[in-house]
Image (cartoon, helix red, strand yellow):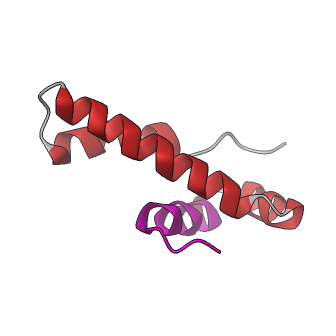
């Protein structure tokens, strides 16, 4: 299990907001991988937005929703 701040944030949010997806990914053994991937994507996106002139808080506000909520499982 990863201990990266963003990965932990993602897993906690997914568990509460999208329990079906969370359980499916956990059962399939890919939850940590999905959280790690989302963490890397958000870090990259925030860095890009900051380099374009946004402050850190603005960049996070834009980037979080892009990766925080994965598509729902059917």
In the drawing, does residue 54 fall left or right of residue 22?
Answer: left
Residue with the most extreme right position: 28
Residue drawn at (48%, 41%) of the image: 41
Which quadrant of the figure contains the C terminus?
A: top right
Q: Is residue 40 left or right of residue 33?
A: left
Instruction: Please tell me whether residue 28 is drawn above or below residue 70 in the rendered image.
Output: below
Q: Which residues are magenta?
A: 1-16
Look at the image and tell me in which quarter the N terminus lies. Answer: bottom right
Which residue is painted at 67% across and 63% down in the image?
32
The residue furthest top is 52
Q: Is residue 3 magenta?
A: yes
Q: Quadrant of residue 54?
A: top left
Q: Residue 25's x, y, as percent?
A: 79, 58
For the point 69% across and 56% down, which residue is it?
A: 33
42 up-or-down from 45: above or below:
below
Displayed quadrant of residue 60:
top left
Percent position of residue 31, x then y: 72, 61
Residue 53 placement (x, y as % from top left):
11, 28
Q: Was residue 42 drawn as part of the magenta stretch in this picture?
A: no
Identify the residue at image location x=18%, y=24%.
Answer: 52
Residue 5 coordinates in the image, percent (x, y)? 42, 68
Q: Overall secondary structure of the magenta stretch? A: helix
Residue 68 in view (yes/no): no
Can residue 72 be seen here? The reply is yes
Which of the pair 67/48 is nearer the observer? 48
Q: Which residue is nearer to you in this view: 40 or 8?
A: 40
């Amino acid at each position: 299990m990863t201990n990266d701040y963003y990965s932990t944030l993602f897993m906690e949010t997914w568990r509460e907001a999208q329990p079906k997806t969370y359980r499916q990914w956990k059962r399939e053994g890919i939850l940590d991988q999905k959280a790690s991937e989302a963490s890397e994507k958000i870090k990259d996106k925030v860095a890009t937005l900051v380099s374009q002139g946004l402050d850190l808080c603005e960049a996070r506000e834009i980037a979080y929703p892009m990766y925080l909520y994965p598509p729902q499982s059917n």
